[in-house]
C-alpha cells in the first residue's frame, strides 16, 4: 500500500508545479488562438490528417503546426493517433465556425481585443481602472465605435458566446401572455430572437446605440423573427424609450461601475409603466470559495470596460438605489441568473 501511495504522490503535481501550470495558462490560450485563426478545426471536420497535410491547406510551417497540435492534444483539444494524424475532440470541435457549440468567435475576440490588456493587469490591480483604456487611450465601447473591424469581431463573439445563455433564459423565465419586451443594449438580437421564437404572442424591441443598430442591419433583415421587431436608437445614459411591459438587460449592468449602473437603472425605472418589470440577466457571484466563471469574468470587467460582477446583496443594493425592488432571482441551466425587479 505504501508503494502505491508513493506512486500516487509522484504523479500528483506539487504546489509549485500547480502554480506554474496556472501561470503558463497563456501558452495554451495563444496556441488555441493560433489554430483558431488558421481554421484547423474546419480542416479536421472531414477526418484525421497529419500536420504536413494541414500545413499545406492553411499555408503554415508543418513543423511548428505539428508541435502546436501535439501540445494541444495533451490538454484534450485534439487527439493524436499512432500514425501521427490529428483529429478533433469534443473540445476541439468547438473551434469550428459552423459548430452548434462554436467558441471560435469568442476565442478570436478575447485574444485580439483583450489579450494585450491583460498583460497590463498590474495597472488595473493598483489603480482599479481598466487596463484596456490605459493601453488604447479610449474606453472600450468608444474604441469599438471607431474600429469597425474590431467591432465586427466583438459582435460575432457576443452572438456565439451568448447563444446557450439565450436559450436557457428563454426556456426558464415565466413570460407574460401578452405585451412588448425591450432588450436594452440588445446588440445583434440573439436574446430577443430566442424569447420571441419561443413566445410568439409577444412583440419585441431592441434599444441600442445608433452605430450598433446600424452595423447589425443586415443580420436583422436576414432573420424572420428579428425583422418583426422594433428598433430604437439612443443612449441608455440619457433615456430609455417608454412603452414596453418588460425591459431586459443581458450582461449590460456588469459593464459599468455603480454610479453609471444606477444612472441606467434610474432611466429604466422612469420608462417603466404601471406593472412593468425589469430583468437583469447577470452572473450572481456566490459567497465563499466556490468555483464560478463569474469570478473570472469579474476580472475581465475590471481589465476591459471597467465594470464588475456582483453578489446577490450587491445587486439588491444597486437596484434599491435606482428605486427598483428585487422580486425574484431565478437560476438558469447556465451560470447566468435572472434578477427580476419592478419599480417600488
Image: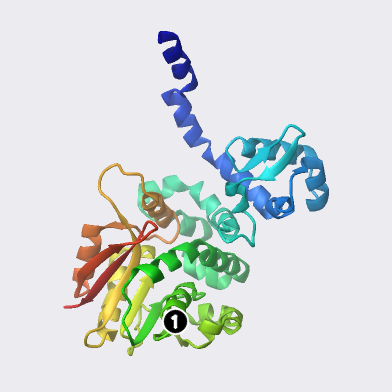
Residue under label 1: 206
Q: Residues within 10 Å of mark 1 (few under 14, many from 20)?
A: many
Q: Position of residue 43 (x, y in %)?
A: 74, 53
Residue 120 shown left or right of residue 336 in the figure = right
Residue 52: quarter of image? top right
Q: Position of residue 331 (x, y in %)?
A: 31, 60
The residue positioned farthest toward the left in the image shown: 344
Q: Position of residue 48 (x, y in %)?
A: 74, 45
Residue 276 shown left or right of residue 16 in the figure = left
For the N terminus, the quadrant is: top left
Q: Is residue 246 above or below residue 283?
A: below
Q: Residue at x 56, y 84 (%)?
A: 224
Q: Residue at x 48, y 26 (%)?
A: 17
Residue 272: quarter of image? bottom left
Asked whether residue 252 appears in the rendered view, the answer is no
For the C terminus, the quadrant is: bottom left
Element carrying mark 1 = strand
Q: Nearer the viewer, residue 146 or 157?
A: 157
Q: Is residue 147 above or below residue 335?
A: below
Q: Nearer the viewer, residue 97 or 20?
A: 97
Residue 147 shown left or right of residue 244 in the figure = right
Q: Residue at x 38, y 59 (%)?
A: 333
Q: Position of residue 163 (x, y in %)?
A: 49, 65
Asked whether residue 271 appears in the rendered view, the answer is yes
Amino acid at each position: 500500500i505504501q508503494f502505491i501511495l508513493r506512486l500516487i504522490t509522484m504523479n500528483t503535481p506539487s504546489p509549485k508545479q500547480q502554480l506554474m501550470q496556472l501561470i503558463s495558462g497563456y501558452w495554451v490560450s495563444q496556441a488555441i488562438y493560433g489554430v483558431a485563426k488558421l481554421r484547423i478545426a474546419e480542416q479536421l471536420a472531414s477526418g484525421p490528417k497529419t500536420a504536413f497535410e494541414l500545413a499545406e491547406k492553411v499555408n503554415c510551417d508543418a513543423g511548428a503546426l505539428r508541435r502546436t497540435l501535439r501540445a494541444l492534444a495533451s490538454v484534450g483539444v485534439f487527439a493524436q493517433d499512432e500514425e501521427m494524424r490529428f483529429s478533433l475532440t469534443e473540445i476541439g470541435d468547438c473551434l469550428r465556425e459552423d459548430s452548434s457549440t462554436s467558441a471560435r468567435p469568442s476565442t478570436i475576440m478575447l485574444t485580439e481585443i483583450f489579450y494585450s490588456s491583460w498583460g497590463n493587469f498590474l495597472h488595473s490591480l493598483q489603480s482599479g481602472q481598466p487596463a484596456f483604456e490605459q493601453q488604447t487611450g479610449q474606453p472600450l465601447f468608444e474604441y469599438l465605435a471607431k474600429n469597425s473591424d474590431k467591432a465586427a469581431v466583438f459582435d460575432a463573439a457576443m452572438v456565439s458566446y451568448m447563444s446557450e445563455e439565450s436559450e436557457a433564459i428563454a426556456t426558464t423565465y415565466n413570460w407574460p401572455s401578452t405585451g412588448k419586451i425591450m432588450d436594452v443594449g440588445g446588440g445583434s438580437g440573439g436574446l430577443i430572437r430566442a424569447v420571441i421564437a419561443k413566445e410568439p404572442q409577444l412583440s419585441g424591441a431592441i434599444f441600442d446605440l445608433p452605430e450598433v443598430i446600424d452595423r447589425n442591419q443586415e443580420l436583422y433583415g436576414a432573420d424572420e423573427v428579428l425583422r418583426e421587431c422594433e428598433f430604437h436608437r439612443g443612449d441608455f445614459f440619457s433615456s430609455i424609450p417608454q412603452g414596453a411591459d418588460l425591459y431586459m438587460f443581458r450582461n449590460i449592468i456588469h459593464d459599468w461601475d455603480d454610479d453609471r449602473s444606477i444612472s441606467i437603472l434610474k432611466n429604466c425605472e422612469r420608462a417603466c409603466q404601471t406593472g412593468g418589470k425589469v430583468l437583469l440577466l447577470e452572473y450572481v457571484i456566490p459567497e465563499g470559495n466556490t468555483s464560478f466563471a463569474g469570478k473570472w469574468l469579474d476580472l475581465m470587467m475590471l481589465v476591459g470596460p471597467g465594470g464588475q460582477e456582483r453578489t446577490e446583496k450587491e445587486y439588491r443594493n444597486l437596484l434599491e438605489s435606482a428605486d427598483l425592488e428585487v422580486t425574484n432571482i431565478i437560476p438558469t441551466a447556465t451560470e447566468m441568473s435572472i434578477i427580476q425587479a419592478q419599480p417600488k
